[in-house]
Amino acid sequence: MKVMTNSEFIALIHCLQLRLLVLAGLAASAYFFDWWLESERLSNPLMVFFLLLAIVSCVTRMYCAWYIFCRCTRDDPTEPPQNLSVDVFVTAFNEPLWLVEQTLRAAKEIQYPHQTYLLDDGGNDELQQLAKNLGVQYLKRETQDDHKAGNINNALTQTSGEIIAIFDVDHVPDRNYLNEALWPFKDVAIGFVQVRLSHSNVNQSFVAGAAAERNDGFFGIPMYGMHGLGCAQKFGSNCLIRRTALESIGGYKSGLAEDLHTSLFLHAEGWKSAYVSEPLAFGLEPTDLGGFFIQQYKWAHGTLTLLRQVYPRLITRFDFATNVCYMWRLTCFLAGPMVALHILVTLVVLYSRNENLVGDFFSYLLHLAPLIMISRLIMKVASKPLQTKTVKLKSRIPALGLCLAFGTWPIYTKAFISVLLGRKPVFIATPKEKTSVGIRLILPQVVAVLLLLVAILRTTTGPLDFQTIGVCCFAGLLIIMHIGVFVAFWNERTTEGGNREPFRSSEE
């Protein structure tokens, strides 16, 4: 009989822990839904509507996440396949010259044989001269139709590499990028490989550090789990795509979430994908709230548009695991409207001073709490065996990225409403430098916090019972969760944005 090794035993124990926690989570969700199934609630059409929202939220966000987390896989890299022809695309549109130069120099110095191209969507003569000076190919087009997607599709007609590595202009690749990221293409069924997105300016500002921390959360266990399910998803820069895979779907897909859009069609066409978890290219996060909000609105609007218009047409072409991965990913920005809804209900309950409403809402929170706590515990346990080297973040408060995302609920809610109404937003590139800062930027958050604070003060001046105190504590938690946005705003106002100089590598 084969003797189990120590590492195999530890892996078995971890697997059992995770599955026991998932069972506990299912029990907690049964406890949560038990609250909704009381007869007086089911007879109320409004409560039935909220019940449906709760079910959809649990299925798409929690159950899908648990399924993904239980399939986490981390593969060790092997030698890259030999004699592949590789084109490296660096996309640019009116970015600073120093930024383009930094990335182009790094792209050219990647060790695996390749051809580097600058894809200039702005027709900048200075960039054309820069490309000539650096000895890289320069491609431009006459229009900016479809933005990044159109830029890439234009380059596809003028290049021939079997593998295409795509970098946003602010992501600087390591010399070993191709040597360490090409190995999954030994499998001819692999259509694309997503490499971890890491960032070089995490200590540049409060917002940059928080945004990078949130980014690291996504590129942790969610991406390991999707990789284990054969459905690692495309996420902007640092991605390698097989040319024949792109050609099979008619080229890069357009939209505000063009990378995710392309990912959907590649998987629908039957291509597999892989995730390389080592940080092999470092980019820039927005350094202030204005830039961060622009980025998040664009991502939210683009993702929710795919959820509404594209995913329903492709759902039957995916297997079960792929549908789970995309349901989780495409619904991530619905957290904004859910936060807005909970703030609104809390205000109604506290300002009404209705004992029945207070009691019902407290009971709801009491039934929800175990589900939230177990869900967080599942995430923590799932991440234990997946530690890898990452950019070191200097967080000023715990769960910094979570707090910043929570405080961005007005942006996500605005995007959600815009998508529901079928509005098409104007394309705005994510700013790489300082944007304007004013109180209007966080006015919805300020109003919400002030209303919650007044509600707590009004409520606590009267007679208190345990249930009222519980609801007030929840209102206080909602206030505390806005701290990321307020601290970021305060830092920008008092220090004029802190260190706002654009990041440059130490080689400059």
Image: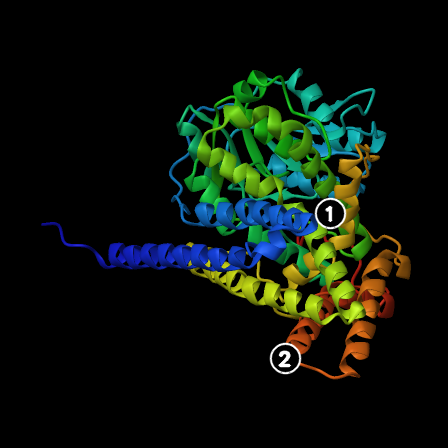
**Residue density around tag 2, few if under 14, some if 14–19, many if 20 or more, within 10 Å:** few
In the structure shown, which secondary structural element does the residue marked by tag 1 occupy?
A: helix
Q: Is residue 19 above or below residue 147?
A: below
**Residue density around tag 1, few if under 14, some if 14–19, many if 20 or more, within 10 Å:** some
Image depth: mark 2 or mark 1 in front: 2
When asked about the image quadrant of residue 97, the answer is: top right
Q: Nearer the viewer, residue 85 or 265?
A: 265
104 left or right, relative to 435: left
Q: Nearer the viewer, residue 62 or 281?
A: 62
Nearest to N terminus: mark 2 or mark 1: 1
Residue drawn at point x = 55 percent, y = 32 percent: 240
Q: Amino acid at mark 2?
A: Phe
Q: Which mark is residue 466?
A: 2
Spatial CA distance of label 2 from label 1 is 39 Å
Q: Amino acid at mark 1?
A: Gln
Q: Position of residue 410 (x, y in %)?
A: 78, 53
**Disc 1 marks which residue?**
296
